[in-house]
Amino acid sequence: MTKNARYILEIINNSQSHLTAEQVYLLLKEKNKTVVQATVYNNLSFLYRQGLIRKISVEGQPDRYDNIIRHDHLICRNCGKISDITLADLTDSLQCQIGFPILSYDLKINYICDACLKQKQENERPDNHENEKKSI
């Protein structure tokens, strides 16, 4: 493993968020001023193929990268916020249902986060509709 790959793995494993390649690049640049984005993309791909990091793909958003510690994800359907959630391991149950061993699974639960729910409720308040009528 190259020095940059080790740094990238360290960045992802120590992060409390789900980083994009761009965010990883900016953090790596603090350690290695000469690094280029292609190095980051190539190393992220390598680390993912080796099973050392997870890639979280959400339609309409850049891929995010995460550690491989067993956990699942909540993804807000409205704003795209990704949050970790730890649920019981479903490996045994899934293997029984499909009838053969599985290597891993990635559970992504779509929901609407509290901030988006609050915003929706504020937008639906009757006084907001009255103000809209007055401005028309």
Image (spheres, rainbow, N blue to C red):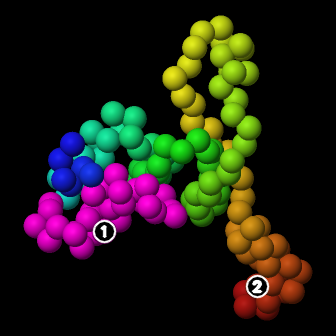
Confirm whether the magenta stretch covers residue 11.
yes
For this orientation, the residue located farthest to the right is 126
| Residue 2 position in % (x across, y down) | 18, 47
Q: Residue at x 57, y 36 (%)?
A: 106
Residue labelled with disc 2: 132
Q: Residues within 10 Å of mark 2 (few under 14, many from 20)?
A: few
Q: Work out whether 111 lies above or below 28.
A: above
The crowd level at tag 1 (other Cα within 10 Å; few <14, some 14-19, many 20+) is some
Q: Nearer the viewer, mark 2 or mark 1?
A: 1
In the rendered image, residue 45 lying in the magenta stretch gets the answer no
Determine the residue positioned at 73% across, 75% down. 119
Q: Give the residue displayed 79% in from the left and 89% down from the top.
A: 131
Quadrant in which residue 81 is drawn: bottom right
> Could you tell which of marks 2 and 1 lies nearer the N-terminus?
1
Amino acid marked by disc 1: Leu
For label 1, the residue is 27
Left or right: where does residue 7 sit relative to residue 128? left
Residue drawn at (69%, 34%) of the image = 89
Say above or below: 112 vs 69: below
| Secondary structure at numbered mark 1 | helix
Observer-nearest of 10 and 33: 10
Which three-letter amino acid code belongs to the residue tagged 2? Glu
Image height check: is 46 above or below 22?
above
* Region rendered in magenta: 7-36
Instruction: From the top left corner, tell me how far across and down residue 42 is, in percent.
Output: 22, 45
Q: Does residue 107 appear left or right of residue 20 in this picture?
A: right
Is there CB contact under 8 Å for labels 2 and 1?
Answer: no
Residue 18 shown left or right of residue 121 in the figure? left
